[in-house]
Amino acid sequence: GAYVLEFFGISIPVLRVAGGIIISLSAWRMLSQPDATEQRRSETPNPTSIDVAPSRLAFYPLTMPLTTGPGTIAVAISLGTGRPTGFHKATLAFLFETVLAVAALALLIYVLYRHSEQLARLMGATGTSIVVRLSSFLLFCIGIQIFWNGAAELLSALPLGAAGPTPVVVTH
């Protein structure tokens, strides 16, 4: 990932800003979309008038749409560029911790995806809606934090005089 960024001349702070925007926008869409149960109540069943692709009809209430996608890739590259350089104990520890974290997350995602129907049934429509809204809000906050970290790095790199022209004071 770092080599691709270097090839295109993209800095890590810019990647963080872009990744934060993508994550925040995805979370905002999840927050602002109507509740699935409300939408289903207002729809009248008419099987002959479905003009929507089947993939758009799927609804997985306990999964975040960002388990893979541009936001995840931006975060992974951003974290990966913070790896220690050279080959020593810190590098081995970083690699071990990264592999362990990826394995734990993959297992957690698998278990949640595998049992999402049972979990949704156990929580009910209201509980599922609450979890989706809370997860969306937390995801929005994570996106803003990633954006802010990148923006703060970019702003701190500006020269002190870059804030604008120096005001001229005229005294008589």
Image: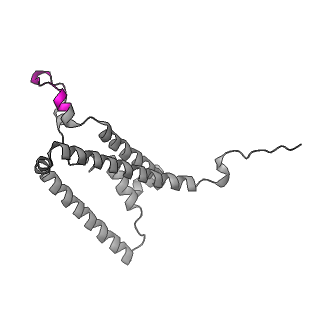
Residue 4 locus on image (x, y percent): 40, 53
Q: Residue at x 45, y 49 (%)?
A: 17
Q: Residue at x 65, y 49 (%)?
A: 162
Looking at the rendering, the stretch of residues picked out in magenta corresponds to 39-51
Horizontal side of 117 relative to 135 (left or right) equals left
Q: Quadrant of residue 30?
A: top left
In the rendered view, would you say 17 is above or below 30? below
Is residue 132 in sight in this rendering?
Answer: yes
- Which residue is the extreme one toward the front? 126
- Which residue is the extreme one toward the right? 172
Q: Residue at x 52, y 56 (%)?
A: 153
Let me know if residue 5 is in the magenta part: no
Which quadrant is home to the N terminus?
A: bottom left
Residue 112 locus on image (x, y percent): 17, 54
Horizontal side of 121 relative to 135 (left or right) equals left
Which quadrant is home to the C terminus?
A: top right
Horizontal side of 143 relative to 34 (left or right) equals right
Residue 120 locus on image (x, y percent): 14, 47
